[in-house]
Amino acid sequence: QVQLVESGGGLVQAGGSLRLSCLASGGIFSAYAMNWYRQAPGKQRELVAGVTSDIRINYVDSVKGRFTISRDNAKNTVYLQMNSLKDEDTAVYYCNALDRRSRTYWGQGIQVTVSS
């Protein structure tokens, strides 16, 4: 069973930065596609950024140029560097793993609050 634990969230002023981390255990991390999702109050969960096992990366348009996803397979960790944060980035952020059998795993979520 894969377990995902997020860290690095919190309260930040608009224009500031945060780095989220997601530590994976219980599986073969290097084989997974890793994603960050977010869900704001009253809104659907959306895919923010993803990185595949062969380092193909994608972002939702609203974060392009501000967020950077990366992975360190030696540390079983995926990161989301968030710069130039805006009010609309406020949400619960979830780490997600997708294995080669299309099984999906979720972290418990971590709050990011951007204050203006």
Image (cartoon, rainbow, N blue to C red):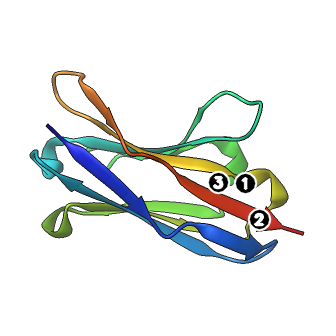
Report the amino acid beneath label 2: Val
Among numbered discs 2 and 3, the one appearing first in the sequence: 3
Mark identifier at residue 64: 3
Question: Label 3, label 1: how many angstroms apart (C-alpha)?
Answer: 12 Å
Among numbered discs 3 and 1, the one appearing first in the sequence: 3
Q: Residue under circle 1?
A: 89
Of 75 and 4, the residue lying toward us: 4
Among numbered discs 2 and 1, the one appearing first in the sequence: 1
Q: Position of residue 66 (x, y in %)?
A: 65, 64
Of 92 and 30, the residue lying toward us: 92
- Which residue is found at the position 83% from the left and 58% from the top? 87
On the rendered structure, is 64 left or right of 89? left
- Which residue is found at the position 18% from the left and 62% from the top? 73
- Which residue is found at the position 55% from the left and 49% from the top? 93
Which quarter of the figure has residue 99? Answer: top left
Report the amino acid beneath label 3: Lys
Say which quadrant the C terminus sits in.
bottom right
Above/below status of 16 relative to 92: below
Element type where label 1 sits in the image: helix
Mark identifier at residue 114: 2
Q: Position of residue 90 (x, y in %)?
A: 73, 54
Element type where label 3 sits in the image: loop
